[in-house]
Amino acid sequence: MTDAELIEKLKRFEETCDHAERHSLALELADNSDPRIFNVLVRLIQRPDLENRRGTLIYCLEAHDCASIKALLEDIARTGNFEAGMQAEIILDDQRLR
């Protein structure tokens, strides 16, 4: 994927209101460790309107170093719905963040 293609996908990823499209784009970008993807994922995960639709987004963080968002992941593990909470737990454990 070229840089221009990545930028376009990230723009669409952050702006779309279609949950299926957002999750599809997230999974498409999941194995790419580009920090711009991490930043968009974190912004989306923190959006209140996506609180019950962020399990896939958290799953996609696995390709990234999540030490900088340890507190966010711990909060989601404690208070998030089942899918989001379990994904946060997996990242915290796999990346030895606690």
Image (spheres, grey):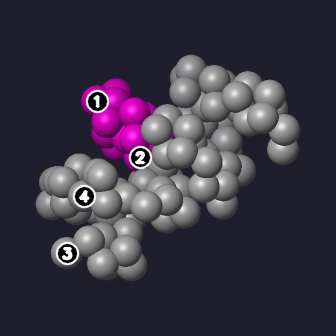
Q: Is the magenta stretch mostly helix, strand or loop?
A: helix
Residue 50 shows in this picture: no
Q: In this view, does 45 lie above or below 57?
A: above
Three-letter residue code for mark 2: Arg
Mark 2 or mark 4, which is nearer to you? Answer: 4
Viewer-side residue, 17 vs 67? 67
Badge 2 marks a residue whose secondary structure is loop
Are the residues tagged 4 and 1 within 8 Å (C-beta)?
no
Residue 22 position within the rendered picture, expressed as x and y whole percent measured from the top left: 60, 37
Q: Is residue 17 above or below residue 96?
A: above
Residue occupied by mark 1: 48
Viewer-side residue, 15 vs 95? 95
Three-letter residue code for mark 4: Lys
Q: Start and end of the magenta stretch?
A: 41-54
Distance from the alpha carbon under mark 4 to that under mark 1: 19 Å
Which badge, 3 or 4, comes first in the chain's sequence? 4
Residue 98 position within the rendered picture, expressed as x and y whole percent measured from the top left: 19, 75
Residue occupied by mark 2: 54
Which badge, 2 or 1, comes first in the chain's sequence? 1
Viewer-side residue, 20 vs 89? 89
Viewer-side residue, 70 vs 75? 70
Distance from the alpha carbon under mark 1 to that under mark 3: 26 Å
Residue occupied by mark 3: 98
Q: Which residue is drawn at 78% across and 35% down?
A: 3
Mark 1 or mark 3, which is nearer to you? Answer: 3
Residue occupied by mark 4: 70
Distance from the alpha carbon under mark 3 to that under mark 4: 9 Å
Are the residues tagged 3 and 4 within 8 Å (C-beta)?
yes
